[in-house]
Image (cartoon, grey):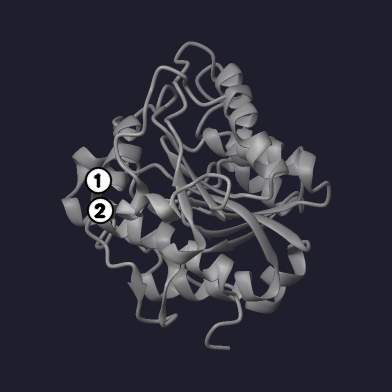
Amino acid sequence: MAGENFSPPLRFAAVPGSLARLRTSRIAVLPVPYDATTDWRSGQREGPMAILEASQYMEHYDVELGLEISQVGIHTLPPVEPLMGDPQAMVRRVARAVAPLARAGKVVALLGGEHTLTLGAVLAYKDRFPGLSVLHLDAHADLRDWYLGTRYSHATVLRRVVEECPAVAVGVRSLCAEEARIVNGGCVRVWYGDTWDEAQVMGALSSQVYITVDLDVLDPSIMAAVGTPEPGGLSWESITGLLKAVTRQRQVVGFDVVELCPREGPGACAYLAAKLAYKLMGYITHPLVGE
């Protein structure tokens, strides 16, 4: 459950109180400041606060959609207290935090933190939607079985997800030989770099979809603030175009934005992460606008 000893320092997008009540909000923002399994450049635990801070300066009106996304209601929950010594237990903690929100029909926007957290949210939503599938946007395959002595890490998260439900990966630009064998074996459909076939992506996704966005899927020229950057990533137009297409053709039940490492890049990166989360909230809650 959300850490009882924490209080949310900021409301996402500075949403006024009348639009920030949990009972009436469509969106529930869940910060999770956790980065226990990172192995190169750490600091992802600072990501949720950086996103919340940057979101204070966004305009609520979205030019593309022609409306104020915040009108659907956005409630910011207290951060989930990190459990640093046991990644599997941390996954369970996230699942317990997300589960009641999923049962209540909320779209949870999990702000990480490292990518391991995604598994907890997926487990909670799978309990609510047994036919769930996952769209994994990431520069890395994350399909290792073990990494640095654990089966629960940022490098194994998609491997654990596909043991629970179907998944599709887009934007991958780096993987090891073990992961390549898994992809070639047909365990998960992967599109490399900034190219994909929209019809094939949709065909691999079920009716209900959870979206996970590892920010290193974006090109480092616009997203330097990540722990493991890879050249050749997606542009803003590419990722928003894909997200809009998915939300128009599938029911997106929840999502996360993870792996922001604020110390590794300019403040513009935190703002981009906040804007991307807000944009996705708009696509999910207004899928037919502008169609």
Viewer-nearest residue: 158 or 71: 71
Q: Residues within 10 Å of mark 1 (few under 14, many from 20)?
A: some
Q: In the image, what residue occupies the spot 44% across and 24% down?
A: 37
Q: In the image, what residue occupies the spot 39% across and 76% down?
A: 237
Q: In terms of image quadrants, where is residue 101?
A: top right
Left or right, 5 with reference to 271: right
Cα–Cα gap, marks 2 and 1? 6 Å
- Residue 286 appears at what percent x and percent y? 56, 73
Q: Residues within 10 Å of mark 2 (few under 14, many from 20)?
A: some
Label 2 sits on a secondary structure element that is loop
Up/down of 150 relative to 53, above or below: above
Q: In the image, what residue occupies the spot 62% across and 70% down?
A: 246
Left or right, 171 with reference to 68: right
Label 1 sits on a secondary structure element that is helix
Q: Is residue 128 visible?
A: yes
Residue wearing tag 1: 53
Q: Which mark is residue 204?
A: none
Left or right, 287 with reference to 114: right
Q: Amino acid at mark 1?
A: Glu
Up/down of 267 relative to 63, above or below: above
- Residue 132 appears at what percent x and percent y? 76, 51
- Residue 10 appears at what percent x and percent y? 30, 41
Q: In terms of image quadrants, where is residue 217?
A: bottom left
Q: How many marks?
A: 2
Q: Is residue 178 visible?
A: no
- Residue 5 appears at what percent x and percent y? 41, 17
Residue wearing tag 2: 56
- Quarter of the image for the N terminus: give it: top right
- Quarter of the image for the C terminus: give it: bottom right
Q: Residue furthest top?
A: 85
Residues under numbered marks 2 and 1 in contact, where contact means CB atoms less than 8 Å apart = yes
